[in-house]
Image (cartoon, rainbow, N blue to C red):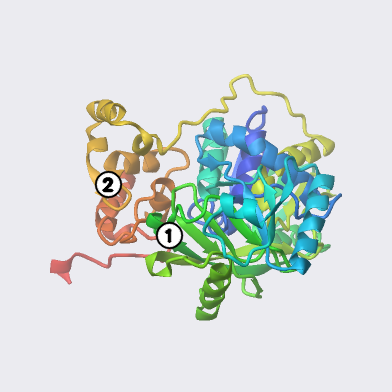
């Protein structure tokens, strides 16, 4: 019997698990995919928003500002990359200026610190590569960037190190109410628990309906992105937004914590919760709008593109409540969900207390997790010392990103361990460079095969059905 089962292993479920692992609770995280961070978490803008956009008084506003304040310490404890680069909302007209003034007032009401409106001369000093047509901008110095899947992997890993259990490939098919507890059922397994926290992202409405809560729906909003080579990472230093619309914050241009340049996302409401296809129309819109902001973006340096789906709730705000005793929703968590995640976790813990859970601090709780990118950021002498202790760190597997065999092995062995090629990619950046895995994939497949004790051809790209090899060449 678990005390709490968290359904969904994205950044919301991950941060909730990490927060609750500080207490004497028997925890389980149930995830339908082959890895964590597989939904909206793996494909978004990676922005830690300052909190000026959300409607004052809303959960989005309250939790965004609090989450943004918590994020630096959490990133440090979890060894996750975090860059307080600041953000700019740029305007090109007097109409834009009025929107920027309104955002400034809204941000001040929400409690965002350091906001100011900057005029063209100061703006061009901050970002010389902006369009000559800019007039002004809202400057938010507390805006930041991080890596959403690195944060999620680290949070869940830290929760597991503190005793939480992770159930992958566990798609919830049914929730049954018993006398004082719930049964959470997949096709193959049943989890018994006193409390459930629904953090199932796009499917949170489906999970809620399993206990009779049909008070909200969630639909997907497609967001396409174009990622450019590290050669372009210094084109801007801040995250550049346009004035927002009802569909979102528009096409942004931002550096990433790994040194690339990211542009996007599009914003299109769709029906299919699994449709992560990209479109020529979407890319045309990204390129056109991004170049209006920063004219000299060299799209011939593009290394990849992708699409993420945001979980848009029907209420217009985050949905955090307890519709039934022992059942808590953390649903409809769209942007600024990543920014709000630490505060959402705090809020979920408070809701759990209100439901009668006893949260006693765990004496053995350890909040620190070693940075998984420590080797590649170490100096030459430090690297040599690490190689002396473990020779696998002296063998480069991914040449584009200079990722070693030792880092890949650690990714497979460390909670939550990588189980497929994409899992290794998200943990190490191997396959994320210019060749996109063209050279290193066979070696990574071999390492996965040996470490997991499975045949070479049984290794997948991203879980069941995504096989890469059908057999050995000489046997075909």
Pointer 1 residue = 462
Q: Quadrant of the N terminus?
A: top right
Task: Tell whether 226 sits left or right of 189.
Answer: left
Give the label, 2 or 1, closer to the camera.
Answer: 1
Q: Quadrant of residue 16?
A: top right
The image shows residue 77 at horizontal and vertical percentages of 55, 31
Q: Quadrant of residue 317?
A: bottom right
The image shows residue 207 at horizontal and vertical percentages of 70, 58
Element marked by disc 2:
helix
Quote the CA–CA distance across marks 2 and 1.
18 Å
Instruction: Say whether disc 2 or disc 1 marks the residue closer to the N-terminus.
Output: 2
Front residue of 103/339: it is 103
Q: Quadrant of the C terminus?
A: bottom left
**Can I make out residue 325 in this image?**
no
Front residue of 459/110: it is 110
The image shows residue 421 at horizontal and vertical percentages of 37, 55
Which residue is at the far front?
121
Vertical relation: 346 (above or below) 120: above
Which residue is at the far bottom?
281
Residue at 59% of width from left, 55% of height from top?
124
Residue at 65% of width from left, 66% of height from top?
250
Task: Tell whether 409 sits left or right of 114.
Answer: left
Which residue is at the far right?
57
The image shows residue 135 at horizontal and vertical percentages of 68, 62
The disc label shown at residue 450, or none? 2
Residue at 72% of width from left, 68% of height from top?
93
For the residue carrying disc 2, how many other residues have a C-alpha within 10 Å: few (<14), some (14-19), or many (20+)?
few
**Can I make out residue 370 in this image?**
yes
Front residue of 378/372: it is 378
CB atoms of marks 2 and 1 within 8 Å: no
Front residue of 326/270: it is 270
């Amino acid at each position: 019997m678990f005390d709490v089962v968290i359904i969904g292993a994205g950044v919301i479920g991950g941060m909730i698990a990490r927060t609750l692992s500080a207490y004497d609770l028997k925890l389980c995280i149930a995830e339908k995919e082959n890895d964590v961070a597989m939904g909206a978490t793996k494909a978004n803008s990676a922005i830690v928003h300052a909190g000026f956009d959300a409607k004052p008084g809303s959960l989005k506003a309250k939790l965004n500002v609090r989450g943004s304040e918590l994020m630096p310490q959490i990133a440090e404890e979890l060894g996750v990359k975090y860059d307080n680069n600041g953000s700019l909302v740029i305007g090109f007209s007097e109409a834009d200026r009025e929107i920027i003034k309104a955002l400034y007032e809204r941000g001040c009401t929400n409690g965002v610190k350091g906001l100011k409106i900057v005029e063209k001369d100061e703006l061009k000093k901050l970002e010389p590569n902006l369009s000559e047509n800019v007039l002004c901008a809202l400057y938010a110095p507390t805006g930041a960037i991080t890596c959403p899947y690195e944060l999620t992997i680290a949070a869940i890993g830290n929760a597991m190190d503190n005793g939480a259990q992770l159930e992958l490939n566990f798609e919830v098919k049914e929730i049954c109410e018993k006398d004082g507890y719930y049964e959470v059922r997949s096709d193959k397994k049943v989890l018994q628990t006193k409390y459930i926290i629904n953090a199932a992202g796009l499917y949170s409405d489906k999970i809620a309906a399993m206990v009779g809560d049909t008070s909200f729906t969630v639909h997907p909003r497609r967001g396409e992105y174009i990622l450019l080579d590290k050669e372009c990472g210094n084109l801007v230093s801040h995250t550049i937004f346009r004035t927002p619309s009802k569909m979102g914050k528009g096409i942004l241009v931002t550096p990433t914590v790994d040194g690339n340049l990211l542009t996007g996302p599009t914003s299109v409401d769709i029906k299919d919760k699994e449709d992560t296809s990209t479109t020529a129309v979407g890319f045309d819109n990204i390129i056109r709008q991004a170049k209006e902001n920063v004219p000299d973006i060299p799209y011939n340096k593009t290394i990849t593109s992708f699409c993420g789906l945001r979980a848009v709730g029907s209420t217009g705000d985050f949905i955090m409540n307890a519709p039934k005793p022992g059942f808590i929703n953390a649903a409809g968590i769209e942007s600024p969900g990543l920014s709000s995640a630490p505060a959402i976790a705090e809020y979920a813990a408070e809701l759990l207390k209100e439901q009668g859970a006893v949260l006693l601090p765990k004496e053995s709780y350890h909040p620190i997790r070693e940075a998984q990118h420590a080797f590649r950021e170490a100096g030459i002498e430090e690297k040599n010392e690490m190689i002396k202790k473990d020779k696998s760190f002296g063998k480069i597997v991914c040449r584009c990103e200079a990722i070693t065999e030792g880092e890949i092995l650690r990714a497979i062995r460390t909670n939550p361990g990588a189980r497929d090629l994409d899992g290794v990619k998200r943990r190490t950046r191997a396959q994320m460079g210019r060749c996109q895995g063209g050279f290193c994939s066979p070696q990574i497949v071999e390492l996965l095969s040996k470490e997991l004790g499975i045949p070479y051809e049984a290794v997948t790209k991203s879980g069941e059905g995504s096989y890469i090899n059908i057999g050995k060449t000489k046997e075909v």
